[in-house]
Amino acid sequence: MATKIRRLTLAAGWLLVASVAGLPVFGIVLGLWPSSPISWQQVDVFWAYNGILSSVVGSLFLAFFAPIIALYVAFTVYSQYRFNPRWQALEKRLAPLLSLPHLAVALGLVYLFSPAGMLWSGLWDLAASSPPEWFGLGRKSMLTMLIAISIKEVPFFY
């Protein structure tokens, strides 16, 4: 009985994946695709749009380097502490951390480390002064996103 339910659930999941993956095909069939062929001039106009090229390059950069950095950090930590009893106890508690929503953790880390974020604001409030403008990580910085995404992805490599 359990195998039948498992097979039915698996079949329903693959049906859902196939239907979502097939939606663009239905858009082409229904006529949502442009009727005239796309010319190179239109592609050049698209890439000339303000900031589109830098956004695409930045996204590709993050998609390539953030997991590599996260894998390096995870491998380094695991290779040093894998036989430690504290680490083995931490591994048992790691599952709830993996259930956190990805975007919420990434944005939370970005806002935590930004100059107006909670961490730096608290430190500068203790010093009774205001931080200089150059201090911390900028909100629109590629380095900020690279650090935040790398930190967020580290637990998934354990």
Image (cartoon, rainbow, N blue to C red):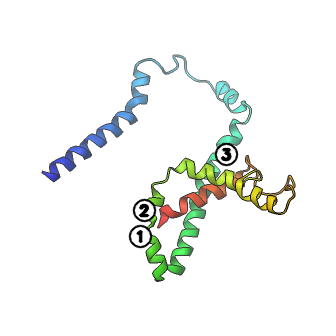
68 vs 89, left or right, is: right
Quick one: 98 or 126, which is closer to the camera? 126
Q: How many marks?
A: 3
Query: Which residue is at 69% across, 33% downward?
Result: 47
Q: Position of residue 28 (x, y in %)?
A: 43, 23
* Residue at 75%, 55% in the rendered image: 137
Can residue 82 be seen from the camera position used here?
no
Mark 2 or mark 3, earlier in chain: 3
Return the residue at label 2: 95
On the image, numbered disc 3 is attached to which residue? 57
Label 1 sits on what residue type? Lys
Q: Mark 2 packing: few (<14 Cα in 10 Å), some, or many (20+)?
A: few
Instruction: Work out which residue is located at the far left of the displayed protein and give it.
Output: 1
Pick the front one: 117 or 105: 117
Contact (CB < 8 A) between labels 1 and 2?
yes
Task: Give the residue number, with chain letter if any, for mark 1.
Answer: 92
133 relative to 34 in the view: left or right: right
Disc 2 to disc 3, how far (Cα)? 33 Å
Query: For the residue marked with disc 3, what is the amino acid?
Result: Val
C-alpha gap between disc 1 and disc 2? 7 Å
